Image: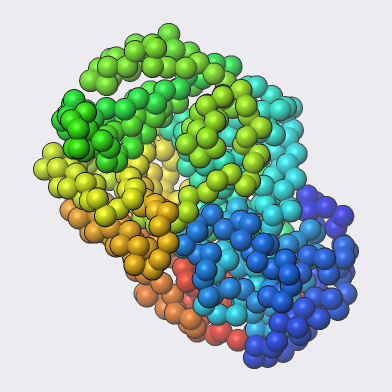
């Protein structure tokens, strides 16, 4: 077998083994398989945690970003915090030999906890320590290992250059492994597209233990992992990304307006203009309940959060021309750098308003939201005033600790990219995306169900006003309410119930790629891409 000293080379590893599958063995037998695996290039014993290990709970919980899964009974039998590619290869081999499913965790932000919770016997491949980032300024590229967060990526880029950035998400603790493989949108989306639109190469370990680069995996698999979710096809260990130009001065603002001041007019105007603004402008609108100026009463507050790739003197005239109703003034705006704008957009997460304190972006252990449930929608035409007024009644529900709708504008370059260029099909024709989110601190099943049911009521209410046939959804805001796979074989038709919502007409091609590269459906979860074949055994040889 050829061994690699680094995962940043593009050769293929071939495992010369054969085995026959067995029913589930004890975790001890699985661990012994890891220890006996002959091609480990770094010791593995110190990165393997079973439930009897005193550090098991702390290792499991360190990357759980949604507290409602903290006390789940569906815990993995084993956690492997891989330090080297060979650790992952051993885990893939031994999982198949001993009847365990693999769950791959990068940042731990999976909305339904699928990267660390499973109803079946499982092992977590935790990429926490595979987070090396190498920036090549001359060629405007970077290699980033899949365990790095987007905050770590942004910070590392900013330490090398002030004129290059990368168009990925907002929340700094999100892992690049899952985020990029699901699309990855953020405040540079209207100018440069998604994170997945700016990937040049990748390294993935497939079901046979082969470490593949773009050339070795082929264009079909490379297409599939850039928006189709990488966990269905293997374990992604690194991405090569294209860095994008950013100006030395970037302008940001966050202003709030309430219904008692502006009624629904300002919200209606946002729907009409946000996707038509200069593509350098990203103007998100967040809607939530807030205290009214009248004592004891409440109102609806719209927060308008924006990033403009340029200076304030150019920005203000653009906004006054297209959106005068907002009443934006120069004093509302702050000029900063691109990395300063990243800190600004993360202020609610990291608790810092110091735009120069960029080191906060590498903090992986910031205070997390206790519990949350999210859902998503895409919109093709503005929601009418009557529809908005009904929405206000749901936001006024005082049984919910915190409920919010985030409206993220599309348009710009998103209108110019074909829906089949990557599996992410939500392109031209969509004017904005809605992210529904409920968060709560109070513990208990009743509280959790009340908040989750609130998101479901809002989602049901919005049905007449959002996309149809399919009702589109964003895979990185995973939502098991829209459909799940069986614990065994899942037919194409059954999986299409949720699959076409995430991927549109690209779902069929994803299934075909899956059938080719993982025909026995080893890499699977409640919403993984299924195969076209009913074969589900693992009696095969590594050749």
Percent across and percent down for residue 109 are 53, 54
Q: In this view, does 295 lie to the left or right of 333?
A: left
Residue 280 is at least partly visible in this image: no
Q: Quadrant of the N terminus?
A: bottom right
Percent across and percent down for residue 320 are 29, 14
Q: Quadrant of the C terminus?
A: bottom right
Quarter where residue 429 is shown: top left
Q: Is residue 56 above or below residue 356?
A: below
Q: Is residue 420 left or right of residue 402?
A: right
Residue occupying the far front of the picture? 295
Q: What residue is drawn where x is 32% and y is 44%?
A: 405
Q: Is residue 277 above or below residue 185?
A: above
Visual colour scheme: rainbow
Percent across and percent down for residue 63 are 61, 56
Q: What residue is drawn where x is 81% and y is 81%?
A: 32
Residue occupying the far left of the picture? 386
In the image, 426 versus 438, the foreground residue is 438
Percent across and percent down for residue 112 are 46, 63
Quarter where residue 379 is shown: top left
Residue 60 is at least partly visible in this image: yes
Q: Is residue 313 above or below residue 292?
A: above
In the image, 173 versus 297, the foreground residue is 297
Quarter where residue 121 is shown: bottom right
Q: In this view, does 22 lie to the left or right of 396?
A: right
Q: What residue is drawn where x is 51% and y is 40%?
A: 349
In the image, 207 versus 179, the foreground residue is 179
**Numbered label tally:** 0
Q: What residue is drawn where x is 45% and y is 26%?
A: 307
């Amino acid at each position: 077998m050829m061994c690699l000293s680094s995962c940043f080379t593009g050769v293929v590893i071939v495992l010369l083994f054969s085995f026959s599958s067995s029913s589930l063995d004890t975790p001890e037998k699985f661990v012994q398989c890891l220890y006996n695996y002959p091609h480990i290039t770094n010791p593995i014993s110190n990165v393997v945690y079973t439930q009897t290990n005193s550090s098991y709970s702390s290792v499991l919980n360190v990357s759980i970003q949604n507290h409602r899964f903290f006390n789940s009974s569906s815990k993995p039998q084993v956690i492997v915090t891989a330090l080297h590619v060979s650790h992952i290869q051993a885990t893939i081999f031994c999982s198949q030999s001993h009847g365990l499913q693999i769950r791959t965790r990068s940042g731990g932000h999976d909305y339904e906890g699928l990267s660390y919770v499973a109803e079946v016997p499982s092992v977590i491949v935790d990429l926490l320590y595979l987070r090396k980032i190498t920036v090549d300024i001359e060629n405007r590229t970077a290699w980033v290992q899949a365990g790095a967060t987007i905050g770590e990526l942004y910070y590392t880029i900013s330490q090398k250059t002030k004129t290059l950035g990368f168009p990925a998400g907002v929340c700094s603790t999100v892992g690049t492994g899952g985020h990029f493989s699901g699309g990855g949108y953020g405040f540079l989306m209207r100018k440069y597209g998604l994170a997945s639109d700016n990937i040049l190469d990748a390294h993935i370990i497939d079901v046979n233990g082969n470490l593949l680069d773009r050339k070795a995996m082929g264009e079909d698999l490379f297409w599939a992992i850039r928006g189709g979710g990488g966990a269905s096809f293997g374990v992604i260990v690194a991405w090569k990304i294209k860095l994008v130009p950013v100006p030395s001065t970037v302008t940001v603002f966050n202003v709030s307006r309430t219904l008692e001041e502006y009624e629904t007019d300002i919200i209606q105007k946002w729907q009409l203009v946000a996707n038509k603004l200069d593509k350098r402008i990203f103007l998100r609108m967040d809607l939530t309940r807030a205290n009214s100026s009248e004592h004891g009463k409440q109102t609806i507050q719209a927060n308008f959060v924006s990033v403009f790739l340029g200076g304030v003197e150019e920005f203000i005239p653009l906004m006054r021309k297209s959106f005068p109703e907002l009443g934006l003034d120069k004093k509302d705006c702050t000029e900063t750098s691109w990395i300063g704008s990243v800190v600004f957009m993360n202020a609610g997460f990291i608790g810092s308003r110091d735009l120069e304190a960029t080191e906060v972006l590498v903090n992986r252990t910031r205070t997390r939201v206790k519990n949350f449930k999210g859902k998503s929608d895409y919109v093709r035409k503005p929601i009418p005033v009557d529809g908005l007024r009904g929405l206000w009644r749901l936001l006024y529900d005082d049984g919910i600790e915190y409920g919010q709708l985030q409206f993220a504008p599309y348009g710009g370059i998103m209108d110019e990219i074909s829906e089949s260029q990557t599996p992410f099909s939500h392109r031209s024709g969509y004017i904005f995306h809605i992210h529904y989110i409920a968060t709560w601190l109070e513990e208990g099943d009743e509280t959790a169900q009340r908040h989750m049911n609130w998101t479901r009521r809002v989602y049901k209410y919005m049905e007449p006003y959002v996309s149809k046939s399919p009702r589109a959804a964003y895979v990185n805001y995973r939502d098991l309410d829209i459909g799940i796979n069986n614990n065994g074989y899942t037919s194409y038709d059954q999986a299409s119930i949720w699959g076409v919502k995430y991927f549109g007409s690209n779902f069929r091609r994803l299934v075909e790629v899956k059938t080719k590269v993982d025909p026995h459906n080893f890499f699977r979860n409640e919403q993984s891409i299924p195969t076209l074949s009913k074969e589900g055994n693992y009696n095969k040889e590594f050749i």
